[in-house]
């Protein structure tokens, strides 16, 4: 499709989730923030999202725009226009009750099992996006770029590659390469791609059909969410079987660090906190520490270092590393607060840790948005010992809240935390190195002058979406000028 006559390209942003309507992870935050910032910078953008119950209930100004008949995934599919609460970003919603109108998460039922028809559910998302990105679109909006996110929209570049006529260029963003949308070959037969595409030079992946590989192979450009992660995924172990393809496409692979919502995550105006504060007026941070200690049943002590962690409790996120060194840490003494869910064995480990160390350890297994803000504000340090982390957001929230993060040097953690300046970084994913890094942070904490400077350094950093959005706009222009 020809480039737009307007100054900036028109973009269709395709995502399986978007905050504040539907969220399972960081992709929802990105989908809610990046399009809004691109729009503020002058890009004409629409966000395409499946019509889950929460999306249909929460979207504003819904209007029917088109009815598709006879698509491979469903006999009748309605396309609605709407707007995103808060930012007003224009939405396009795929209303298909047989595929999206169900309880549970976008990807799994209440038992945690993947929906058995996820191939059909997300091939529909990709198919509608591909139609809207081609000259077969029923809408007046004709995007120059279709920006795809993760495996759920990975078929878009393949479908557009084989579509006749004019069509949009495609960008495929990897938020986490570990999730690849792998289905049996029979799923390929239902999609309608030409048989020759089911090969190593195409969508085939060890005898199966990978939605993500389809996107990585056929997209005009690939992005991921930090420069370090872009390098890591071109080799083992973080390439997860895709490293050969990604290394081959390295000239078309760019890492762009995510931003954060600087309004939602602002300690000077955060309604979820006990007391606001900023880099020049830090008294409020002590009030939030006390509130956090009270809420989590910890001993009220303004001087004891309080370590916070908000995370999926999994091997990837390093929850096991913290469990292993916790008995040593608690001899310092320190306090530990954990919020998250994940692996049942690790969850039980943290419950037992809290039971064994009352007043020193608080663990809430679950998720609570208000508590997550209070932990960022009330903790003295924030723990992110992830074995891999494509970008990460909490390390940026932490610096903004004057809570220096302690992170493993991987992915976006390595790109956004300056060791000894705004946080603390360890190189090897071992309990020994993690423990040593915490010890360095505790030593700095005891030096009040040094600690105040580290806090201020982090709080003054600009993690807004503007820089990231400007990088994407420049990338769009480069792609269209090729």
Image (spheres, rainbow, N blue to C red):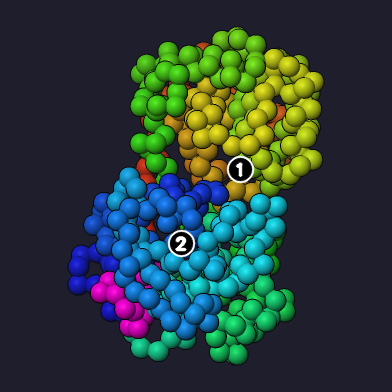
Residue 51 vs residue 227, the one in the foreground = 51
**144 is within the stretch colored magenta:** yes
Assign the N terminus to one quadrant of the image: bottom left
Q: Residue at x 49, y 80 (%)?
A: 75
Of residues 250 and 469, the one nearer the viewer is 469
Tell me if 83 is positioned left or right of 318 in this view: left
Q: Residue at x 36, y 66 (%)?
A: 80
Give the overall secondary structure of the magenta segment: loop
Residue beneath the point at 20% across and 72% down = 5
Segment tinted magenta in the rendering: 132-148
Which quadrant would the C terminus be assigned to in this image?
bottom left
Q: SS class of the residue under badge 1?
A: loop
Q: Looking at the picture, does residue 474 appear above or below residue 361?
A: below
Which element carries disc 2, helix, strand or loop? loop
Q: Is residue 410 left or right of residue 353?
A: left
- Cα separation, mark 1 vs mark 2, equals 38 Å
Q: Is residue 481 visible?
A: no
- Residue 68 in magenta stretch: no
Q: Is residue 242 above or below residue 402?
A: below
Snapshot quadrant of residue 46: bottom left
- Residue bearing the label numbered 2: 51
> Which label number is shown at residue 409?
1
Task: Residue 47: name its quadrant.
Answer: bottom left
Q: Is residue 395 left or right of residue 145?
A: right
Of the numbered discs 1 and 2, the one sitting upstream in the chain is 2
Q: Nearer the viewer, residue 62 or 252?
A: 62
- Find residue 457 and report its horizontal and vertical position in percent: 43, 28
Residue 45 showing in the rendered view: yes
Task: Give the crowd class for mark 1: few <14, some 14-19, many >=20 residues within 10 Å.
Answer: many
Q: Is residue 323 above or below residue 77?
A: above
């Amino acid at each position: 499709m020809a480039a737009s006559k307007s100054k900036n390209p028109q973009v269709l942003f395709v995502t399986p989730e978007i905050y504040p309507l539907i969220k399972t992870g960081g992709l929802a935050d990105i989908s809610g923030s990046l399009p809004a910032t691109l729009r503020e910078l002058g890009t004409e953008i629409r966000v395409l999202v499946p019509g889950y119950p929460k999306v249909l209930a929460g979207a504003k100004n819904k209007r029917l725009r088109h009815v598709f008949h006879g698509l491979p995934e469903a006999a009748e599919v309605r396309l609605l226009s709407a707007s995103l609460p808060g930012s007003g970003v224009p939405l396009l919603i795929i209303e298909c009750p047989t595929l999206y109108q169900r309880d549970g998460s976008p990807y799994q039922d209440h038992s945690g099992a993947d929906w058995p028809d996820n191939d059909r559910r997300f091939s529909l998302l990709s198919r509608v996006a591909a139609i809207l990105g081609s000259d077969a679109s029923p809408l007046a909006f004709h995007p120059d770029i279709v920006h795809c996110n993760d495996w759920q929209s990975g078929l878009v570049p393949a479908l557009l590659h084989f579509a006749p006529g004019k069509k949009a260029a495609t960008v495929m963003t990897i938020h986490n390469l570990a999730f690849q949308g792998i289905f049996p070959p029979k799923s390929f037969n239902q999609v309608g791609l030409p048989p020759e595409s089911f090969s190593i030079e195409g969508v085939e992946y060890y005898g199966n059909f990978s939605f993500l590989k389809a996107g990585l192979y056929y997209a005009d450009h690939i992005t991921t969410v930090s420069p370090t992660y872009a390098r890591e995924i071109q080799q083992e172990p973080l390439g997860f079987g895709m490293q050969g393809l990604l290394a081959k496409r390295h000239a078309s692979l760019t890492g762009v660090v995510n931003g954060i919502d600087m309004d939602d995550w602002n300690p000077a105006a955060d309604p979820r906190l006990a007391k606001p504060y900023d880099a020049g007026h830090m008294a409020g941070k002590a009030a939030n520490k006390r509130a956090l200690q009270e809420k989590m049943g910890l001993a009220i002590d303004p001087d004891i270092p309080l370590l916070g962690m908000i995370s999926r409790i999994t091997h990837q996120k390093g929850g096991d590393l913290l469990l292993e060194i916790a008995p040593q840490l608690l001899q310092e003494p320190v306090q530990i607060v954990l919020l998250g869910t994940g692996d049942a064995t690790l969850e039980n480990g943290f419950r037992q840790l809290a039971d064994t160390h009352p007043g020193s350890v608080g663990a809430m297994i679950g998720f609570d948005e208000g508590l997550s803000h209070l932990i960022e504000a009330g903790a003295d340090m924030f723990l992110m010992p992830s074995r891999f982390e494509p970008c990460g957001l909490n390390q940026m929230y932490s610096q903004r809240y004057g809570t220096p993060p302690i992170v493993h040097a991987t992915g976006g953690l390595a790109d956004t935390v300056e060791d000894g300046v705004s946080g603390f970084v360890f190189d090897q994913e071992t309990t020994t190195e993690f423990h040593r890094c915490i010890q360095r942070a505790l030593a700095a904490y005891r030096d009040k002058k040094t600690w105040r400077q580290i806090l201020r350094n982090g709080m003054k950093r600009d993690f807004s979406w503007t820089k990231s959005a400007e990088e994407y706009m420049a990338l769009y222009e480069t792609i269209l000028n090729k």
